[in-house]
Amino acid sequence: MSVEQISYIVFIVALVGSLVLDLFVLNPKGKAVAFKSALYQFGFWLAIGLAYGAFIWMEFGAKTAMSYYSAYLMEESLSIDNIFVFILLFNAFKIKETQLGRLLLIGVLLAIVFRIIFIFAGISIIQNFHWVMYLFGAVLMFSGFKMFFQNEESDYKPKESFMYKIMNKYLRIHYDDEDTTFTTRINGKKYYTKLMLVVVLLAFTDIIFAIDSIPAVLAISQDKLIVFSSNIFAILGLRTLFFVLRKAADKFDYLAQGIAIALIYIGIKLLLTYWQIEIADWISFVVILVCIFGSMIVSALFDKKAIPHDDNSTD
């Protein structure tokens, strides 16, 4: 058995074991997740992701491990941005605390499915049309500039989204807060509940984020093991990360700008390969690390909500 085969087996065992542990031990069905518990659980997911990187280092060397850690850090950062949209979505539809865990689990599983599909498609396209890599570079730079200047909270309004309008136009939706299933019957007619509406919006959100996520990770590495493992291990902690970040969503005012700069850097790195200019993997890792943690430090030092606004008043 080859080292690569062993690495895939370790990855699959870690993935399945983690999901079973999450479903049946850490988060019983219908139970709200406390902040402290979510914090410990996210630490657990983070440890698994970092430990797999150490395994990659031992089996394939430092260069491959740096690619993994760069991809993992980038995907984890994009997951944080994804979480902020989830928070806005659940708040908009006033989802009950006891329903959050189930909806987040569905969101995570859908994210895994969509990432696998996009990864296979992306690698296949690159192998047959190498010039697409330069298109990915341009897409990443565009996404980065767009993210840098956008205001996530004001730009994303779930009830004004295209998918929400389509579902309300063509489907019967029941908005009762007491619904705990995805469909219900009223006077013999089938209605979709608010929970089903949110699931569809979650899926749509996962697809949108995958459009940024997959080109970003493929720009770092086209090794299937690195791409799959970095994506999946970053997604696994998404559910518990939600319960951590919703308590501190307003503490990361400049995180989006840090992620944006990292995306722009990766896009530039990709475009430079056209002129045979290669940037070392460890440099990319350091740049991404500085962008993400630097933006967190800036957020802590300069709180937007603490900055007084000029109301043009006179003394």
Image: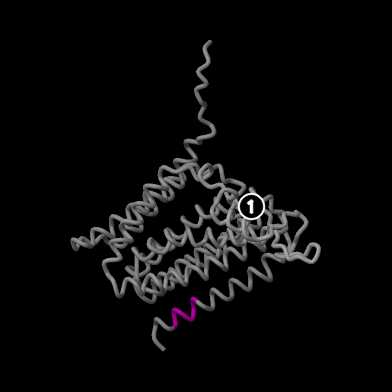
Q: Is 4 situated above or below 125?
A: below
Q: Amino acid at mark 1?
A: Phe
Which residue lies most toward the left here?
275
Q: Which residues are magenta?
A: 6-11
Give me the residue at 59% from left, 62% from top.
200
| Element on which disc 1 rests | helix
Which residue lies most toward the bottom here?
1
Q: Which residue is mark 1?
A: 90
State left or right for residue 123 relative to residue 312. left
Give me the residue at 46% from left, 46% from top.
255
Give me the residue at 38% from left, 71% from top.
57
Give me the residue at 48% from left, 41% from top.
299
Q: Position of residue 48 (x, y in %)?
A: 52, 67
Q: Position of residue 204 (x, y in %)?
A: 53, 60
Queried whether the magenta region covers residue 203, the answer comes back as no
Queried whether the magenta region covers residue 7, the answer comes back as yes
Which residue lies most toward the top here?
315
The secondary structure that most of the magenta stretch takes on is helix
Q: Position of residue 210 (x, y in %)?
A: 46, 62
Q: How many numbered discs sit on the rendered protein?
A: 1
Q: Is 301 situated above or below 290?
A: above
Q: Quadrant of the N terminus?
A: bottom left
Q: Position of residue 298 (x, y in %)?
A: 44, 40
Is 210 in front, or is 190?
190
Tell me where residue 196 sits by quadrant.
bottom right
Few, some or many C-alpha atoms within 10 Å of disc 1 (few <14, some 14-19, many ≥20)? many
State left or right for residue 108 relative to residue 138. right
Is 136 in front, or is 308?
136
The coloring applied to the image is one colour
